[in-house]
Amino acid sequence: MAANDYRVYLRNPAEMESGPARFHSAQSAEPTCRPLVFGTLVVMGLLQIVSSVAILLHLTGYLHEVDLSSVQQKSLEEAEAGPVLADALKDPRKRERSRCAKVQKDLIPAAHLPIRAPIDYVKRGVIDAKVIQWNEAQGQLHKVRYHDGRLLVQEGGLYYVYAKTCFRRYDVESESAPALPQEGGVAQLIQYVYHERHTQQTTRPTLLMKSGSTKRWNSLDYNMYCEHQGRLFRLREGDGLFVSVSNSWMLDPDADGSFFGAFKAGN
């Protein structure tokens, strides 16, 4: 048995070459693996290149965005600093006039006038209703004019009109005091608020509000009576408003007690 194996070992090399190849499958697999390895390397290289390009584009876009934001912020600061610098270089008097004009433009039309003292526009003892004169110098007027006891509207709209008048019993010992009603006498104290439309050829006052009372004076007590009323009215440009009262010679000259005014509440 061993001799047969030895003869096989000593066979002719030509016979061994003509025999079946033992490593044929290994040799045929080598060419197949090489393209696979090469393709894998190519794909990995392409992926690395794509990743590098994407990162570069992202960083470039971010840097561009940051640069653009800084430029916009700088432009905004320069734009804001421009008017401030220009305003600082202006004449202070012109700047003050411009600011006053702007404030005047933004003001709401309004008026408030205290009563004018002394009350020398009516005779002592007159009972008939007389137009009250107001103190323009101590009042406030914004887009509303005053003339001869009247408020003249310069801007049409919805106005709240108000008036308050106070009557009181004067000191009997005062020489300048008007005559008083007799002891236990009766005085009719009525307040009227009128509206005039000056745009018409004929001015006809229209009564807007009326309020009052009949009072019995008593010399033993301090006699004082006040009447206050107010309402909303729609007025036009050029319209006038005035207040009249009966027994106006008995009006209290205190500015805190008797006053007249209006302000715009809407269009």
Image (tube, rainbow, N blue to C red):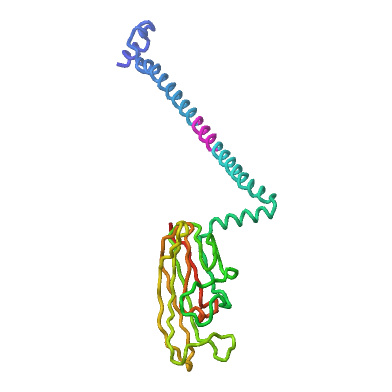
- In the foreground, 102 or 120: 120
Q: Quadrant of the C terminus?
A: bottom left
**Does the magenta run of residues contain 53?**
yes
Eyeballing the image, is 44 above or below 178?
above
* Quarter of the image where one finds residue 134: bottom right
Q: Position of residue 171 (x, y in %)?
A: 55, 89
Q: Residue at x 51, y 73 (%)?
A: 132
Q: Residue at x 49, y 27 (%)?
A: 49
Q: Position of residue 74 (x, y in %)?
A: 61, 43
Q: Position of residue 31 (x, y in %)?
A: 40, 16
Q: Predominant secondary structure in magenta? A: helix
* Quarter of the image where one finds residue 141: bottom right
Q: How many marks?
A: 0
Eyeballing the image, is 151 above or below 125?
above
Q: Position of residue 29 (x, y in %)?
A: 37, 18
Q: Residue at x 32, y 11 (%)?
A: 20
- In the foreground, 109 or 17: 109
Q: Quadrant of the N terminus?
A: top left
User: Which residues are the magenta region?
Assistant: 52-62
Q: Residue at x 43, y 91 (%)?
A: 184
